[in-house]
Amino acid sequence: GQNIDQPTEMTATEGAIVQINCTYQTSGFNGLFWYQQHAGEAPTFLSYNVLDGLEEKGRFSSFLSRSKGYSYLLLKELQMKDSASYLCAVRDQSRSTDKLIFGTGTRLQVFP
Amino acid sequence: ETGVTQSPTHLIKTRGQQVTLRCSSQSGHNTVSWYQQALGQGPQFIFQYYREEENGRGNFPPRFSGLQFPNYSSELNVNALELDDSALYLCASSWDGGSNEQFFGPGTRLTVL
């Protein structure tokens, strides 16, 4: 089956660092995305990992371990505007369809 | 801004009615995917269209159907609306079904009463 797990909610303080974990079990794995979604808005792309290791992009970094079915998103120097839901999505290219399978999202609240 | 637009922004329908949602993909993108996002959930894959043909479908009944046109626009049609169809409907476009990123539109919020 296909299963993606991430924590439902997290809280953190402005200026701190937070790590959002994601574990997955899917067929046809061809990469993992992280999206940010503010309430009532569309998801916006943050990162894409297809090989093992850490990808750094400014304040955001994403890590992937394919053998462990595990990824995390690291947010540094948190700002109030980082309060949003963070979606982990696996790119599944089975049965000739290229689709994203999303977790339920982690709602992050940043406090001053 | 992703260059993907959707209309309408919000829509209210009653049970049993039919609805058509529209999406205009980013220029040059030949693949469009539709997702349903219920409140507090992640988006769920409905189906994908590639070069105007359905190219895969998620776990949704046949009353969910779609079309893709040569001008990069597409439609999602839902017949016999049910209360549980209330959700945010997102379209996402990409190139050749194999690009690294799907670009999401702002979504249509459908409420079924």
Image (cartoon, rainbow, N blue to C red):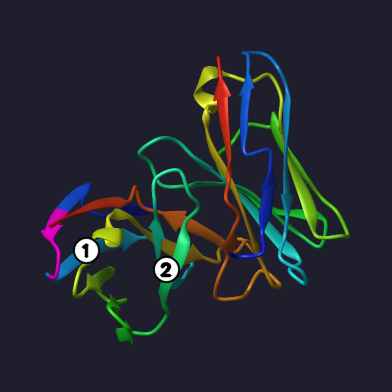
Q: Quadrant of residue B19?
A: top right
Residue B109 in the image: x percent, y percent? 56, 35
Q: Identity of the amino acid at label 1? A: Ile
Query: Mark number for residue A20?
Result: 1
Labels 1 and 2 within one chain: yes
Which disc number belongs to residue B44?
Answer: none
Of the pair B42 and A90, the residue shown nearer to us: B42
Q: Which residues are magenta?
A: A11-15
Residue pushed farthest front? A112
On screen, residue B26 versus residue A50, left or right, reads: right
| Magenta stretch, main secondary structure class | strand
Q: Label 1 to label 2, Cα distance in Å?
A: 13 Å
Residue B87 vs A3, above or below: the answer is above
- What residue is at 45 percent from the left and 43 percent from the top? A40
Q: Chain of mark 1?
A: A
Q: Position of residue A2 (x, y in %)?
A: 39, 53
In the image, residue A107 above or below residue B17? below
* Residue at the disc numbered 2: A33
Give percent across and percent down for residue B42: 41, 47
Local packing at callout 2 (Cα closer than 10 Å; few below 14, some 14-19, many 20+) is many
Q: Secondary structure at mark 2?
A: strand
